[in-house]
Image: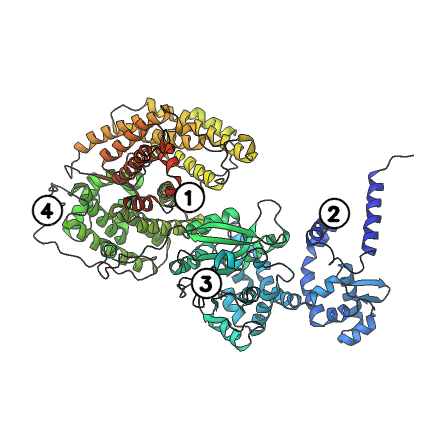
Amino acid sequence: MAAKTPSDDALSLVGKLEEFLKGSTSGFDHLDGSVRRRLSEATRKLSLATESTGDTVHRIVHSPLQLPLALVGVETRLFEMLAARKQNADTNAGLAQKTEVDPALMKRLLRYYQAFGMIDQPEDDQYRGNNVTEAMITLGGRAGVPFYLGTLTPAFNALPQFLRDTKYANLTDGANCPWFPGHHTDEAPFDWVQKRPEMMQHFMSWMASQRDGLPIFLEVVDFVKEFAQNSDDSTIVFVDIGGAMGHQSIAVRQRYPDLAGRIVLQDLPQVIERVKANPLPGFEGLEAQEYNFFTEQPLKGARAYYLRNILHDWPDHKCIEILQNIKPAMTKASRVLIDEMVLLEKGTPWRAAQLDLAMGTCFAAMERSHADWVALLDKAGFKIERIWKYTEQVDDCIIVAIPQKRHIKCDETRPSCDKCTRAGWKCDGYALSLQPRPSRKAGGKATVAKASSGGPELSITSYAIPFRIPGAQKDRQMLHYFCVQGSDDIAGYIHSEFWSNAILQQSHQEPVVRQALVALSSLHLNYTTADTPEDGSRRAEALALYGKAMRALKKRIETPTCATTRAALVCCILFYCFESTLGDLEAAMHHLTNGLNILSHHLQNYRRESSQDLTLLSGVFERLDLQATMFDDARVPYLVLTSEKDDCQSAENARREEEGFSQLEEASDTLIKLQNRLFHFLARNSTFKSPIKESLPPLILKEKNCMIKQFDTWRARFSTLEHRTQPADYAALGNHILLVHWQTSRMLLFSNFPTDESVFGASPNPAANDVIDRATTILQLAEELNKASIAAKNPRRNFSFDTGIVAPLFLLAMKCSDESVCNKAAELLVSSRRREGLYDGQMMAMIVNRFRTAMRQNEGHGNERSISKSIEYCFANEIDGSRGGMNRLADNVIQWK
């Protein structure tokens, strides 16, 4: 007997499929949902795999016919008539008469519909409906077909030319996307639709029916148990933001008829008017409120703020605005429920993939993956608490989000709350009105030449400012101080082109930047020389100058240009430094977030216009982004500077290893990128906490090995710089600080995936002691350099914007089990007298010492958990409960008895 050939197997499969189809004349609704999906996907793949090249091309090039011809079938009611005759077929002549379509045209239409499976043709001139026909007469078919053809198709047709014109940049600018050239309009999609009542009706019906047959989130989430326990009639349990006709609000009430509390539907006035005029069945007892989600949420303290398919309509910066408008209304019991797709990185369902590009084409928006959601929520100040997946077809999920930082109220001594009077205003973004703090004139005569009463004189015989400036003599004195000393101090241990040159060029070109720089210089001089940071008349003057700069920036950005963007970015950096110096870290982080949003938007949409100074600014924001992430464990870096797909074995990497670094700045920039990748890696895989290597996904191990090689390559390249540096010159400071950061980053990498407690738990700990020795050397060299200050003598403390030694020392003090390392780190933090961006050495030392005191008390009570263990190990719960940055941890520690 001859062996079977592949053709024999294929024919056998065909026979089985034909028999299967004959035995399923009643359809496949009886099948289990998962089985039906697998069968559909398998046959779809089989169809694609077996069609010829010619068939593939013809199917794709003629696909634009399908939507308009579907509309013909809907509008002539042909599909409706055939769906009613699934058992008894009709003829061409009969259908032509009933639809008033020319018989010759009807025959051609029927030929097309049966060829593409939209109807059945059991015999010659016999036609009847099938499951596709029935789908076309549902509300979704009757509304979706005309809506997509009339509204979205013109934008789809404009997509190729738009991408060519934009050099295939990603679709992220809602004011510049294919929608506008496709419709030859300057109206945004929602505005365009609202002016066309028939299309608006199609849109509302489509939104209500597009997920017919699919589960809703209540199938997997016990809403009362998770979000609405102990509610009463006054409790707002569910706020349906942008909920259209209120389908989800009704579903909650019908699922939980005995639930106490208010359910409120919110939408634009024209939608709420429609809801009130024609409420859906079940809307009785629910509330409807007019609300625009680009304004602050008026309902305070709700248990659940629900967003269904809202954020996928908007690019990131608009989503951030929507989420941040909810945040002030939230209490500890509040949650944001985001009902959206969470795309798979592999094997994304076809419905989800096509909707993603539809959103991009019309709104410059997107469907998002898990990593996208993490990054977006982090930028908005939220983090994911939990995700429930409730559909397989389109990856629908409920994302539960909570604020990373709880809303901090004033100290309730209004109107003179210390926080408000010190900052001078509530800063909720540059678009808002910023009210400056009134200048408080200090008693007595305090000239600008003094840092404070009795403070050091500024001995100026000739100005070191490289250009002439208008304005008061005080401004020139502050810029002189910045040029001869402040710029180096603020830059930190590594030379910065931004602080030495670029900032002065911007000051010369942009008055708003000059005002901001004068304010920062004034505050910096006061901080470094006053008896305490709060002393001195210069502090009040600096706050007044700061308010003036903020008002000037608000006015400047009313005329958006590339120059405006640069000025705004520089001011964000200066304002970040100003607030960091004051110790208002939440305000500093707010300015950083503003700057990162502006930078990201500009680089994504105006890449061709990017210049060298924007590249320089990007480097500064890369450092601040990393600093903010190190300061707040819950934060993920905003910027992505490298990819996990980078090839560690590439010829380019090998060549670089042989070359070495040409200068310290190059080594620093490269290390920043490695650290950025490291913190993304740690955050992305934070759920994999296991000491067993074999239990980890291979991709995690592969990426870790890649990063180990990259860190080792960096160290090999850096050795060339060490040989060219004298032990006691300024460059030696930079060498030591980079090696401190390299060593601590490498320790973080080696201690994770798999978890290795010996990295920080060793006692003695040679790696940690190496960091301690280098930090000691840094402080000794820095002290010698401080003595050489030529503008402001006797500095009592130092401020720099860059992350220097404070963060690494604090990390060792918290993580290391070696008591000598912890003690030395705490001593160095105290003696450093440094604030480095968000990190204050004195504050970090206080946190460490409070924890170590508590550890000794635990030991004295026989609690063995503190013996030979790190602070992080012994107080894991307390530290995890202080998410929001080291300032939040400090607040909690200070309250300990």
**Is 442 in the magenta?**
yes
Instruction: Point out residue 529 in the picture as x, y percentages from the top left corner.
Output: 16, 41
Secondary structure under the numbered disc 1 in the rendered image? loop
Residue 886's x, y, as percent?
33, 43
Q: Which residue is tagged 4?
A: 453
- Quadrant position of residue 699: top right
Residues at marks 3 and 2 touching, judged by CB atoms closer than 8 Å: no
Which label's residue is closer to the chain start, 2 or 4?
Answer: 2
139 w.r.t. 585: above or below: below
- Give the spatial CA distance, label 4 vs label 3: 58 Å
Q: Circle 3 sits on which residue?
A: 231
The residue at the far top in this view is: 723
Residue denoted by label 1: 637
Q: Chief secondary structure of the magenta span?
A: loop
**Residue bounds of the magenta highlight:** 434-445
Q: Earlier in the sequence, mark 3 or mark 2?
A: 2
Check if mark 1's residue and mark 4's residue have beta carbons within 8 Å. no
* Disc 2 crowd, CA 10 A, few/some/many (<14, 14-19, 20+): few
Mark 3: amino acid = Ser
In contact (CB < 8 Å): disc 2 and disc 1: no
Of pointers 2 and 1, the one earlier in the residue sequence? 2
Q: Quadrant of the N terminus?
A: top right
Q: Residue furthest front?
A: 861
Locate residue 239, reporting x and y percent.
Answer: 47, 64
At 53% from the left edge and 61% from the top edge, which residue is drawn? 179
The spot of residue 493 in percent (x, y) is 28, 34
Which residue position is annotated with label 2? 46
